[in-house]
Amino acid sequence: MFDCPLPGSRVLRRRATALTVAGTALALAVPISAAAAPDPVSSFSFTVQERKDALAYWSPARIKAVGKSVDLGPTGPKTKTWTGPQLKTVGRMFMVNAAGADTWCTATAVKSANRSVVMTAGHCVRRSASPVNTNMSMVFVPAYSKGRQPYGAFAVRTVLTPRAFAEEGTNDVAAMVVDADKSGRRLTDVVGGTPIAFNRAVGGKISSFGYPATHPQLGEELLRCVGTEKKENGQQVIPCDMTGGSSGGPWLADFKESTGQGTLVSVNSSLDGFTPTKMYGEILGATAKTMYERAERG
C-alpha cells in the first residue's frame, strides 16, 4: 500500500490485505452500555486565509509544472480519452500532500443541500492510518482540460473522511465542502451536481473517470474506463488500468454517453498492482452517507 505519492503526483494505493486487532472488553474502564460510540467521521478545516492562499498558490504556471513533474508511463489500453459532452461536475483537484509535495487527484461535484459538496478518495485528502497527516492548499477545478479552467477554481473549506480511514486506512472515500467562487456563486449553481447513491447493490456497467499521470496526457485530459462492476473482498472492482492522478475520480452508474450524466456510486481508490488491470472502489454504505450528509450541512 502506498500512502506517500511520488513527488508531484498522487499514486493510487496498491491493494493490500491488512489485519488489525480490536481492543478487548478487559481494556474498558466503564461498562459498554455507558461508553459513547465514537464518531464515525473525522474532519478538518482551513481558515479563510489558508483558503485565499491556496487559490493564489495554484497559479497556471504551478499547475503546468506539477503535470510535467511525473510520468507514470503510457496510458493503458483500457483507458480512453473522453470525447463526449463536457463533464462539468468532474474536475482536477490540486493540493500539497502531507509530505509537502505538489500533487493532484480527481473529484466530482455532487448534488447537496448546501450546493457545495465534492466527493473524492480519502487518500487524496490525508495520509491513511495517520490522523495528523492531512493535505493542504486544496483547490477543485471543475471541467479542467489542457490548462483551461472554464468554471474557475473553488477552495476547499472542510474535509471529511470516515474515521476508519484516518485511523486504520480502511473505507477510502472523502467529502469536501468548498467555498463559493470569486463571484459568490456556489459550486453546483455553476456546474450542476452529479446524483450520488448509497447502499446500492453492486453490479452493472460503470464508467470511471480520472486525470491519470500517464503519457501523452499527463493529467491534462479527462480519461475513462468502462466495465462491469463486481464485488471482491468487501469492495467493488472494475477492469481498468488508470493510474495515479485518477484517484478519487467518479464511478458513474447508468451513464448516458449522449448527455454525460450518471449517478456516482463509488470513487477510484486502489489498483491490483504496478501494471494494473483492476480498479477498486469502496461500497458507499452507512458511514459514507453520514459523512456526505454532514458535509451538505457544512
Image (cartoon, rainbow, N blue to C red):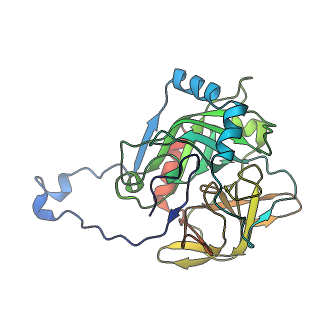
Q: Horizontal placement of 99 versus 229: left or right?
A: left
Q: Residue at x 21, y 52 (%)?
A: 35
Q: Residue 251: horizontal and vertical position, in percent?
A: 66, 63
Q: Horizontal placement of 148 versus 57: left or right?
A: right
Is there any visible trace of residue 47 in the rendered image?
yes
Q: Residue at x 75, y 23 (%)?
A: 183
Q: Residue 78: horizontal and vertical position, in percent?
A: 73, 72
Relative to 262, say whether 55 is above or below: above
Q: Residue 100: horizontal and vertical position, in percent?
A: 48, 39
Q: Residue at x 57, y 38 (%)?
A: 177
Q: For this rendering, which residue is in front, 139 or 174? A: 139
Is there any visible trace of residue 296 in the rendered image?
no
Q: Residue 223: horizontal and vertical position, in percent?
A: 75, 59
Indicate the quadrant containing the N terminus: top left, top right, bottom left or bottom right.
bottom left
Q: For this rendering, which residue is in front, 288 or 146? A: 146
Q: For this rendering, which residue is in front, 189 or 165? A: 165
The quadrant holding residue 244 is: bottom right
The quadrant holding residue 273 is: bottom right
Q: Name the residue at the top extreme.
A: 49
Q: Residue at x 70, y 36 (%)?
A: 187
